Amino acid sequence: MSAVQKLRVGVIGLGIGRHHIKGWQEHPLVDVVAIADPDAERLALVGDEFGIAGRYASAAALLDNAQLDVVSVCTPNKFHKELTLAALAAGCHVLCEKPIAMNAQEGREMLDAAHAAGKRLMINFSYRFSAASRALKTQVDAGLFGDFYFGRSIWHRRRGMPGFGGWFGTKALAGGGPLIDLGVHRLDLALWLMGYPQPTWVMGSTYNPIASEIATKAGKTFDVEDLAAGFIRFENGATLALEASWAANIQEAELMETRLLGTKAGLLQKNLNEGYTFDAHVFTEVNGAPVDMHLCPPTALAKSAMHDYAEAILSGQPHPAGGDQGLVVMQILDALYESARTGAPVKIG
């Protein structure tokens, strides 16, 4: 591709899709030229906000008419597979919102279709792209931590059920609750820092005592969990605890932490002030004395997943957060839900 030719991008679904548009617009060689959403009012508002002329009431119309290089799929999870397959068939690379699909079987079909089409498939695991996460990954790759053998990655909300009564709380559209919505991010972040070890088995539990009662009183649909917890063992012997909730009786409004213990040092990535900015710390020992390091990466280090995907496509380099990693995450989520259902450990692979 010529260095001066811009990528033509389309975005399907304008809820989280608005954030995709902002991310794509970070790159100077990207033009978001088309958007699609069945909500006419939202389509007009977002189109006006970002100055996008190509506006379509359906994904099919966008794919048939917009002549795109890349498509962002930003719909409820139920539609990830069919829209990704359609975009690949139209000759587009795809950036799909997390999780990759409703289950691992669908994810495998998407990955196989991308390989067959000779196109790229990336998953929007956005939390690995923060400045704090990137700074920690640099130290991981430099060997500062040695081998990771245990970790805990969590995302808890005191009360934070997205779009309460909508598709997020409907299993047929979402596939699950906070585990598949929030836990997916903290799982990917931990796996990415650990080098994506091969999972062998999991044990999981799910609960919904708080949200189900609220939903019943409000007459809202809610048939997923409001808290999930799991334990994952990997082929290399390492283990990871994973927790996620939309409703939990905790002190913080929002708590995100990923802790990994290595043979040489440990790390912590956490949110600040119960919000969406992040800190990075390293804990080690020097000459027999404990040493704590606070990483202070420049904010310019943070680039969106869309920016990095565009750069990879334009330069012909491998892209981050590939569909293969999205599939591993989905296999673990499937196994955790199955373990919660049966009350027994579930093997993977």
Image: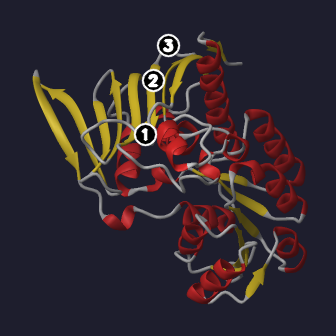
Query: In the rendered structure, which amino acid carries the disc numbered 2?
Result: Leu
C-alpha separation, residue under disc 3 versus residue under disc 2: 10 Å
* Distance between mark 1 and mark 2 Cα atoms: 20 Å
User: Residue 5 at x, y = what percent?
Assistant: 71, 82
Q: Is residue 9 left or right of residue 184?
A: right
- Callout 2: few (<14), some (14-19), or many (20+) C-alpha neighbours within 10 Å? many
Tell me where residue 172 sits by quadrant: top right
- Mark 1 or mark 2: which is in front? 2
Query: Quick one: label 3, few (<14), some, or many (20+) residues within 10 Å?
Result: few
Residue found at x 51% / y 53%: 162
Q: State how far apart marks 1 and 3 are (Cα).
A: 20 Å
Residue 184: x percent and y percent? 54, 40
Q: Label 2 near label 3: C-beta < 8 Å?
A: no
Location of mark 2 (residue): 240
Q: Which residue in the structure is indicated by mark 1?
A: 141
Q: Which residue is mark 3?
A: 237
Could you tell which of marks 1 and 3 lies nearer the N-terminus? 1
**In the image, residue 339 above or below residue 310:** above
Please identify the quadrant where the N terminus is shown: bottom right
Query: Is residue 8 placed above or below 75 in the rendered structure?
Result: below
